[in-house]
Amino acid sequence: MITPDRIAGAIAQLPTLSTVATRLWSLTRDERSSVADFEAVIRPDPALTANLLRYANSAWFAPRSRAESVRQAVVLLGVKRVCEVATLAAAARVVPPRLPGYGLDALGFWQHCVAVAVLSERLSGELGLRPPDLTFTAGLLHDIGKLAICSFVADQSDEILSGLREGLSFVSAERRVLGLDHAEIGAAVARAWNLPPQVADVAAWHHDPGRAPDSVDRALVDLVHVADGLAQLVGFGNDVGELAREIDRGTRQRLGLKVQQLERAAGDCLEPIREMGALFAPAGGPR
Amino acid sequence: MALITVEISDLRVSADQDSTLVTYALGSCIAVMVHDPLRKVAGMIHYMLPLSETSAQKAAERPAMFADTGIPLLFKTMYGYGCEKKDLVVKVAGGGALYDDQGLFSIGKRNYTVLRKLFWKNGIIIAAEDVGGARSRTVRLEVLSGRCTVQSQGEELAL
């Protein structure tokens, strides 16, 4: 079992997430904001500025005209894409080279995060559900708890793996051996980083949306739960838990989701996941 | 020894005798591995979804994404190397599932069903298979020997 102060220490040691992305998302919700407001938030961040120009001029985005400035990039990409790029760039910077307890390197972890972000947003569109800002961000950051507890998981990996062989899901095995799991700790990390409460809720309940309290946006948690399952199922960044994960019984009905929608989303998202993942790959070395 | 990686929704065929075909993290996806011991040719597909009717556009761009367009293409590519159906040794791995009693994530099972139908219609026999379960698999196929291995849950076994 891990004591609360050891967890608090691990969270305090994580690099913090840049707040630029959160500020940009809130600008998109403000009708009065202008391109100049976006520019004012982005320009002081040289790494983000570079990323944004790289993205706007990348082959994948296939620009008709070249973006030379932040202002042009914002106009070319649109504010939603700009926010996504900022979120991806911020998240890529906090991914460590390895997550030992989960059997993942930076790229494996990253591929999974990007896959869940892209699939959550795509499924949300398919179901006509909700504005994309929180869906993408919450999907991308659903597993941040793993950053804080990967070394504890590594210390006890034999016991956790023997739980899997007994038929437990990975998250249940974590809880049995450590007394806590990466979902619960993810919510604590989200709060420590001052992320929107919905992002913390998704981190907290993404393995168990049915048990989330009524105050939580359950549709959002359900979406990320499904996207997470789908990403694992088709092999985007599998961790040591492989497919040992439970799907909530109520999710299918609550979302009104059909198997064909799931399959179409998986097929359509394969390339966007690869391209977006590669453009913002964390500095972790080759796989 | 050269490793030829077969990505998700891709297929590769090789007659390079120093090479090994490999594909990583098969969840619900399925790898079909075909080896011709006479001509020393090996092929592998890593398909993701059962039926191309899900997206005609994707099927045109990436036939190896779907069982019904990808598997015939794998065999045709083998025949292009001079292989004959009667000589081919066919093995199958993947088709895993999550703990999902509502059947929403039944992609693995559907992937396997379509494969069995295709093989039955075309008289193709599966020499060995490792499918299903809450497992992710990495598989390798050596071009020269046809030796095929499945790595999963920390163990590697010959198939």
Image (spheres, coloured by chain):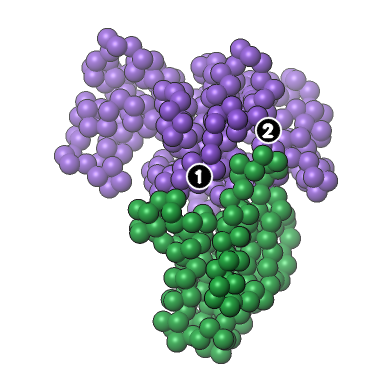
Give the side of residue A70 with respect to residue B59, left or right: left
On-image quarter of the C terminus of chain B: bottom right
Question: Looking at the picture, how far across and down is residue B39, in whole percent?
Answer: 52, 88
- Mark 2, Cα crowd under 10 Å, few <14 / some 14-19 / many 20+, is some
Question: Looking at the picture, how far across and down is residue B65, in whole percent?
Answer: 46, 58
Picture quadrant of residue A86: top left
- Mark 1, Cα crowd under 10 Å, few <14 / some 14-19 / many 20+, is few
- Checking the image for residue B41, the label placed there is none
- Residue type of the residue flagged with mark 2: Arg
Which of these two is toward me, A52 or A151? A52
Q: Residue at x 44, y 76 (%)?
A: B76
Above or below: residue B18 compared with residue B156: below
Give the side of residue A195 with respect to residue B133, left or right: left
Q: Residue at x 51, y 16 (%)?
A: A196
Which of these two is toward me, B92 or A117? B92
Gap between marks 2 and 1, in whole Å? Answer: 18 Å
Colour in which chain B is shown? green
Determine whether the residue tagged by mark 2 lies in a helix, strand or loop: loop
| Viewer can see residue B69 | yes
User: Which residue is denoted by mark 2 in the rendering?
Assistant: A249
